[in-house]
Amino acid sequence: SERRRSFQVSQQERATAPQPGATCDMTAPSALLLRKQLAELNKNPVEGFSAGLVDDDNIYRWEVVVMGPQDTLFEGGFFRAILTFPSDYPLRPPKMKFISQMWHPNVAKNGEVCISILHEPGEDKYGYERPEERWLPIHTVETIMISVISMLADPNGDSPANVDAAKEWREDPQGVFKRKVARCVRRSQEE
């Protein structure tokens, strides 16, 4: 379907994303900005998540741990994810993929996070989002993570990445959906 194609990584995106194991130019403007944002997060941690590098030699791949928001089904969880930044960050958004199991309408079954703030800037060819809801270069890792935490607390069922989770969330939020999320929370605590 057209919606599914929008989640596939284009050849251009693959070409501009630094590859795992590749040496990174730590003096590139994007690398300097990411190093500054990481230092700021370490100096002044933000409630709800922690962040660090997957590999000290690659500023473009971060591991984040999202704490399940209080008073939500995700409370008590410690969900690990990878943020992969393009070499032209902040002109283009990073990709975020949970490596902890996640059952949520806005997280694809493969773990990819689907929220407006992580979508390429400009017009949405499907008409779901306004340009100002999509990626803007003023966003930071902090604003991304706050949006992800908000997404956990308040899913967007109108534009799901996981149709099965969205259906369960709409039809039986305190039944099957709640049980599957509880299983994800337990597993995240064991990782």
Image (cartoon, grey):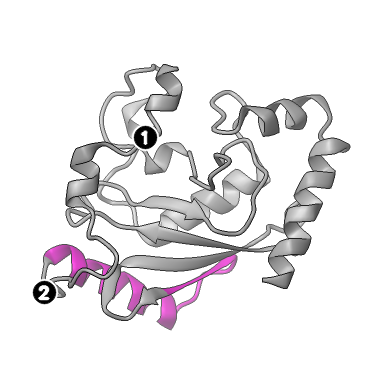
In the image, is 21 to the left or to the right of 101? Answer: left
The residue at 51%/60% (across/down) is 81
Between the C-alphas of marks 1 and 2, the distance is 30 Å
What is the magenta segment's predominant secondary structure?
helix
Q: Give the range drawn in magenta.
A: 29-52
* 167 or 124: nearer the viewer: 167
User: Badge 1: how crowded within 10 Å, few (<14), some, or many (20+)?
Assistant: few
Above or below for 155 versus 81 = above
The residue at 32%/29% (across/down) is 131
Circle 1 residue: 8
Q: In which quarter of the image is the C terminus?
A: bottom right
Q: Quadrant of residue 165?
A: top right
In the image, is 172 to the left or to the right of 50? Answer: right
Circle nearer the viewer, 1 or 2: 1
In the image, is 121 to the left or to the right of 46? Answer: left
Q: Which of marks 1 and 2 is nearer the N terminus?
A: 1
The reply to whether residue 75 is in sight is no
Q: Which amino acid does label 2 sit on?
A: Thr
Image location of residue 111, percent across then percent down = 54, 48
Q: Quadrant of the N terminus?
A: top left
The reply to whether residue 170 is in sight is yes
In magenta stretch: residue 93: no
Q: Quadrant of residue 67?
A: bottom right
The residue at 25%/30% (across/down) is 122
Q: Which mark is residue 55?
A: none
Image location of residue 120, percent across then percent down = 29, 37
Circle 2 residue: 27
The residue at 36%/37% (across/down) is 119
Q: Is mark 1 on a helix, strand or loop?
A: loop
